[in-house]
Image (cartoon, coloured by chain):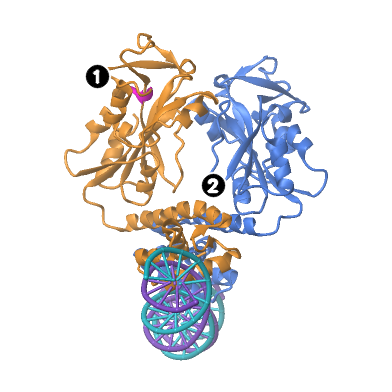
Chain colours: A orange, B blue, C cyan, D purple
Amino acid sequence: MDPHLLRTYVTVARLASFSAAARELGYTQSAVSQHIAALEQDLGTPLLARRPVVPTAAGERLLDHAGPLLLRLAAARADVVRLAAAPVQGLTLAATPTSLGPRVLAALPPAGVTLRVLARDEVPAAVATGTADLGLVDGLAAPSDPLRLPDVAPLTAHAVGEQQVRVLLPAGHPLAGRPALRLADLADARWIDAPDAGLPLAQLRAATGGGGFRSALRYDGIDLHTLTALAAAGHGLALLPAPVADGVPGTVAVPLAEPRVVHRGELLHGGPPRGAAADLVEALRQP
Amino acid sequence: MDPHLLRTYVTVARLASFSAAARELGYTQSAVSQHIAALEQDLGTPLLARRPVVPTAAGERLLDHAGPLLLRLAAARADVVRLAAAPVQGLTLAATPTSLGPRVLAALPPAGVTLRVLARDEVPAAVATGTADLGLVDGLAAPSDPLRLPDVAPLTAHAVGEQQVRVLLPAGHPLAGRPALRLADLADARWIDAPDAGLPLAQLRAATGGGGFRSALRYDGIDLHTLTALAAAGHGLALLPAPVADGVPGTVAVPLAEPRVVHRGELLHGGPPRGAAADLVEALRQP
DNA sequence: ACGGTCCATCAGTGATCCTGATGGAGCAGG
DNA sequence: CCTGCTCCATCAGGATCACTGATGGACCGT
């Protein structure tokens, strides 16, 4: 199970074509065919049905493994090389949209920062593969409970702050006048499902133990302004950290009383941070 | 970064010797030397100091990655092969010592079961690599919260039961008469640190947010009888699921009132279970 | 000084991995 | 039915790679 073979396998499966994969990878079609044949012989089972090119059951299973595997491989390489390479100029920060609270923004150095806003799952990957020097992720968690992150590589996490959670209601909503809300009261409401922007409904369902939380609209983007505008227009409720939820025009942000969860931010890095990254880690570290 | 090179690298690092690694892997010393040289050239940095053979900083970092990486690779292979191979005769079950509650024991088929009791981290690895068909892990968690398991591979988990948590006190302990205990009251007590037997103190500290929980004795074994005997003899307190803690001679098992955690068991499997494994999954599945 | 051990290096060879060419299968159009 | 096209499998050949076995230099204990 050579990683090269694995890589050509996933591109063949993705493009559903041997020849297209060969073009993309810079091989001849012959080489790709041999790669797949070698993999199938090694594993003792067909992985792809030909004509049309579709993964078999075993092939599907291999696809589940191959992505994380290749990611980890890239992460290992990047992590080791990072130690050896010269300290980088500048600082690349990968962050989820809701993780950029005032405290982080204040601590950023005045120049030389590249900021890439990514979906929640992509941040650890970016840090692991060295695409970013540091990562900022956030999410709902019980107080002083670490976030559950996909472990693509051994990353170090520091808590950088916990913020209150607010329910974002359109201004005219019947519950808008309440001083606080319990999540159980809102199980029957319609929610915006925005997995990439930090609001996966599945997480809410898990937190409250099951039912409810129907989705009114699924938002696959990442932009928070759009998300709050959707909430203001009555397309569904949203659960957001206080600094993001407060002051959105046309909405009311009501604190969440129950369950006792907080919006927690964590700073990720691979090896020991160096240069500007080290300064930022030091500045943001929980006192 | 060929996995073969990675494999010889980890064995060289483990044995601190090129020649010993060559013997173990069935290579010549020359080949091992070339493997390491190839890796170092590929990554552009020395990984090992020679004479004595000790990993450099970059090498240490690579070691952190290599283990999980090779594990995942083996897991991917096993998972795919499992789908293709003939359904296994019998059933191999990997379990932590505390995970074998009465419900599980009752559901086991009357014959043909191989049971391997392993440390908590080794169970997912055993299931992923196909050493076991099914895995049973357990641990403390908030009610209806999934366990945090090392994700060596995409495994499927089913909850199989939640049990009350008891503090195991020696019979003469001053707190033995209490109807219930709060963990915060016990932060200053001495605990048995038994990471392999399912009682890692680090987990307790995390659950209560920090301090306390000094360790009186560290128990590296896996055997529960020894652990309860240690607790009875006053070598420290232990936190155990009710079915294990109740009825241990010379001890009193007091329910834990605060924090509200349960002892949760989960059943793990890789691909879709087949044969006897499928029956057991069906029988244990939470109704 | 001298074996002994250990790792690095080198030459040689068998295996491997590519490319380019060829062939068969399926498909659309005539 | 035949033809032209696309797609994948297979084959032959050549460059490259990965091993072995031999040799050499560095260090260690005697």
| Mark 2 → mark 1, Cα distance in angstroms | 43 Å
Name the outermost residue toward the left. A111
Question: Disc 1 sits on a residue from what chain?
Answer: A
Q: Secondary structure at mark 1?
A: loop
- Any mark on residue B154, and which? 2
What residue is shown with label 1? A249
Asked if residue B238 is positioned above or below residue B73 in the image, the reply reads: above
Q: Was residue A239 drawn as part of the magenta stretch in this picture? A: yes
Q: Quadrant of residue B101?
A: top right
At which x and y percent is residue A108? 23, 36
- Residue at horizontal 58 percent and vertical 33 percent from the top: B215
At which x and y percent is residue B241? 67, 29
Q: Is residue B155 left or right of residue B41?
A: right
- Residue at horizontal 52 percent and vertical 75 percent from the top: B29
Is the residue marked by circle 2 packed among few (<14), some (14-19), or many (20+) residues within 10 Å? some
Asked if residue B111 is positioned above or below residue A102 in the image, the reply reads: below
Q: Let me know if residue B97 appears in the view.
A: yes
Q: Amino acid at mark 2?
A: Pro
Is the residue marked by circle 1 packed among few (<14), some (14-19), or many (20+) residues within 10 Å? few
- Any mark on residue B205, and which? none
Q: Was residue A7 drawn as part of the magenta stretch in this picture? A: no
Q: Amino acid at mark 1?
A: Pro
Q: Let me know if residue B40 appears in the view.
A: no
At which x and y percent is residue A15? 41, 58
At which x and y percent is residue B178? 67, 14
Q: Quadrant of residue B217?
A: top right
Q: Secondary structure at mark 2?
A: loop
Q: Main secondary structure of the magenta part?
A: strand
Q: Where does the magenta region start and end?
A: A237-242
